[in-house]
Image (spheres, rainbow, N blue to C red):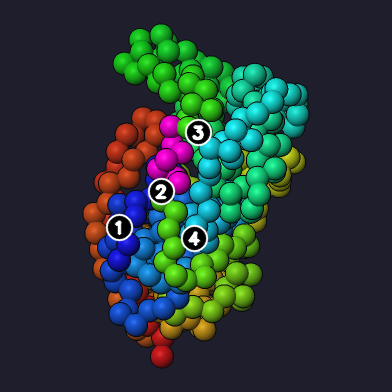
Amino acid sequence: MHSKKLPKINFIGNKEKIAGWICNNFPKKTKTVFDAFSGGGSVSYEAKKKGYKVISNDILKINYILAKAIIENNKSQLSKKDIETIFKGKPFKGFMFKNYSRVHFFPKECMELDLYRKNINKLSSLHKKALALTLLRRAMIRKMPYSRFNILWKKVVQLRDEDFSYKYYKRKRAYHNQSLKHHFLENLESYNTSIFDNKKKNIALNLDVLKAIKKVKADVIYLDPPYTGTMNDYYSFYGLIDNYILSKKIKRFKNDFIDRNEALRNFNKLFSSLKKFKYWYLSYNNQSYPNSNQLLKILKKYSNNVKVIKKKHVYKITGKNKKKTNTEYLFIIKNK
Ligand SMILES: C[S@@+](CC[C@H](N)C(=O)[O-])C[C@H]1O[C@@H](n2cnc3c(N)ncnc32)[C@H](O)[C@@H]1O
């Protein structure tokens, strides 16, 4: 087991605190783990540390890039010269300035983002580019109140006003006003040192889960879909970063598990396509729809070997409910 540490990612609904518990339940003979909804990469990273070949997939481009940077990438770090390249030159009025000034960031910050995006393309490898974008993701999120991009500008301005924030919330939140470069550099070392070689050819994919399932071969598939009925609209949380990376506005993705009416249909579709995997591990919690008993019923349509284990898990949620205690379920399915 490698002793490496996942850097600070800040991903809503991440499984960082229970990733060890999840991976410790994988069968001893496991060689390849497919993390089909990899998000902030916490389970993929733990599986990589345990020496498995890891295949990470997520529909959001930024989550794919994050997996490219810290899961697939076994060796590339950002050097001093790379940092000079990223921050060299004058901020200019590009895609971010034109589309997101006073929507998510102040105009000057958008111009800086436009410069950094252009410069990152000059880095010498895909893994370096991915690592730089992942660090920039972290910097962008540090500047956003509630760490997500579905907050109205009026509220952003209010919460970035340190006196207002202190008066009403007893927190200055000064980090929202520190520069993107400051946050990038502050996190650089922990991201660089999180890169390690587990001697496996790990892979990052950027596909809808049903397409990815068709492509991937693995002993274990780990499923952590957005939980219907909870805070789970990942497109609205992080889609802006995809737009930034691609310099174009992407459409909301379909089949994203947030619609209550679609949830049962989605789960049936998902489970009916998993036959080729011997072991399925599904994370679920007690706040979601369908509830765990209903989910168990659905699973039993597809396998007669379903086990459920439980653990208390405290989620950090931004906004009013600072912390929420949930019971986390891990459904374990063994196919013949
Ligand atoms: C609960 S999060 C995963 C969290 C992750 N286990 C972690 O520890 O950070 C669910 C993820 O599913 C992704 N997702 C939603 N719909 C998807 C789909 N149809 N195909 C692939 N990924 C999808 C979201 O972008 C989100 O990153």
Mark earlier in primary sequence (4, 1): 1
Q: Which residue is mark 3?
A: 184
How many numbered marks appear? 4
What residue type is disc 1 on? Ser
The picture places residue 260, in percent across and down from the top left corner, at 52, 55
Judge depth for marks 3 and 2 and give the one in front: 2
> Residues under labels 1 and 2: Cα distance?
11 Å
Q: Secondary structure at mark 3?
A: helix
At 52% from the left edge and 23% from the top edge, which residue is drawn?
179
What residue range appears in magenta?
186-192
Mark earlier in primary sequence (3, 2): 3
In the rendered image, residue 188 lying in the magenta stretch gets the answer yes
Q: Which residue is mark 1?
A: 3
Asked if residue 160 can be seen in this view, the reply is: yes
The picture places residue 254, in percent across and down from the top left corner, at 65, 56
Circle 3 residues within 10 Å: few <14, some 14–19, many ≥20: many
Split into 4 quadrants, where in the image is the C terminus?
A: bottom left
Judge depth for marks 4 and 3 and give the one in front: 4
- The relative height of residue 161 versus residue 138 in the rendered view (above or below) is above
Q: Which residue is mark 4?
A: 74
Secondary structure mainly formed by the magenta segment? helix
What residue type is disc 4 on? Asn
